[in-house]
Amino acid sequence: GEMAAQVTTLPLDVQAYRITPDGKGLVFALAVFPECKGNEIACTVEKMEERKASKATGMVYDKLFVRHWDTWADGTRNHLFYLPMGGNAAPISLTDGVDGDVPSKPFGGSEDFCIAPDSKTVYYSVRAEGAKEPWSTNFDIWSVPITGGTATNLTLGNPAWDAAPMVSPDGKTLAYKAMKRPGFEADRFWIVLRDLATGKVNALAPEWDRSADDMKWSKDGKSLYVVAGDVGKTPLFKVDVKTGAVAPLSKDGHIDAFFETPKGFVYLKSGLNSPSQLFASKPKAKLIDEGAVKLTGINKDLETFAFGKYEQFSFPGWNNETVHGYVIKPANYVEGRKYPVAFLIHGGPQGSFGDSWSFRWNPQTYAGAGYAVVMIDFHGSTGYGQAFTDAISQHWGDRPLEDLQKGWAYALKTYPFLDGDRAAALGASYGGFMVNWIAGNWKGAFKCLVSHNGVFDSRAMGYSTEELWFSDWENGADVFQDPAKFDQFNPMLHAKDWSVPMLVIHSDKDYRIPLSQGIGVFTACQANGIPSEFLRFPDENHWVLKPQNAMMWHDTVFGWLAKYIGGGGK
């Protein structure tokens, strides 16, 4: 309730930050030029002023990345600094000269570094791979004295991804997440414990076949609380540090954030029928969402809208292995009627369409418009064990397609309200690739298609995307050494067989799957005389995020669906 006081007066914007446990200082990130070693802040400001004063706009690069996600590289790196509070001390550089980013770009945050409980040491995760960076997933965890000095690489022996360092409350153990396979971004994140006195490293709960996401120490240091995808849901788990025993702490929905309190937990949870809301668990409850008290009522306008009821189902998919999915009834559902269907295909491809809320691909928007929805977590999806996730690599067009076909057949047989004669397939990213693949390889199932930011030419994707480790791993080759491998599941090679009306959506600032891929899809449709439209956003990236653009996106998509599969039941 007190008046906020400004604690920094720096000439550069503060990025992620943490307050030291003793409350006497800050560790924060600034974007600086790594060549400004020894004088990072002042030198960076000087270089920025020189650029601003120049009338030339060109940029010379001598290595990749030249662009990443939605931003062209400007030569700066996110570096860590320590600033004592309450005096006139200058910031102390903790990653001086490092050719890497802490936090990592484009999505890293304060989880990429931590401060020891005694406020004397900082631990951080960084990828410093030089010219190999676009082909590398090798993040290492380093330690450095908080007052500056020599940094030590604690994970030099692991050539894969080490992330999210956090020190136990007693300061004796470092927990972090680690992958085992270099170049594979969707490998399982194992939980690793390092004894800070001896350097001994052990995997915690190695038999638990789930990939750790958000992770925190318990206040008593006896457990780690871990969020992980699990069969179409994303619960909170408790992992015993001594035994590795894993126990679920929540049941349904998606735990978006959590904090341990003296009496239990305060947490954010979303689901297919609700955006994130804040809850407090009951004292001593075994599951935090049993009898929890809802603390917020954000977005009360949603209470005036009907939501579609949903249920999870499973069926034998590729290799006769169990595959899961969700079906959502239209919000205006009437027993005995049949409804047009939106068949939604998730991206990643290592991702999931589960019991969670999205402000982009939200099945309830389709249910609210009078459509039933079917979503399949095909082979390659996360939350079903690492072997299930691995199954899609080098198999983008066969195993998942078989799952989608079998899941669609199962859903039509099981849920009589689905009108299989009035159905559309829609997807983004990998889902957009699959829509493009379906156009030439699954005939007769859908009356229209929607392809958002999807791969059209797999070979061109291999040399025009930015995170090159991804395309190399997923195709099992370097595109320049073995380009034929990129053609095994290349939608462009089947475009001559397309015939189904398609809405194509793409954005200029998508550097993951460049705009030329979407233009290629639309060109193929137009060349083949296929009814088609192209929706372009000049100011969006791989996702459509601006509210008015999101409205236009949905209006255009629903207009397309209404044209070809109608709306409402019959």
Image: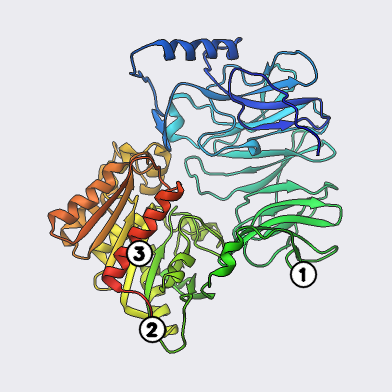
SS for tag 1? loop
- Residue at image mark 1: 291
In-image side of 286 versus 446 (left or right): right
In-image side of 174 versus 397 (left or right): right
Q: Looking at the rendering, in which quadrant would you find the C terminus?
A: bottom left
Q: Is residue 484 above or below residue 382?
A: above
SS for tag 2? loop
Amino acid carrying label 1: it is Gly
Comparing 87 with 548, the one in front is 548
Q: Is residue 538 above or below residue 343?
A: above
- Specify the label residue 338 is tagged with: 2
From the image, state whether disc 2 or disc 3 is nearer to you: 3
Residue 501: x and y in percent read 22, 64
Visible residue check, residue 436: yes
Circle 2/circle 1 CB separation < 8 Å: no
- Residue at image mark 3: 558
Residue 478: x and y in percent read 34, 39
Residue 385: x and y in percent read 56, 60
In-image side of 223 versus 344 (left or right): right
Q: Is residue 190 above or below residue 397?
A: above
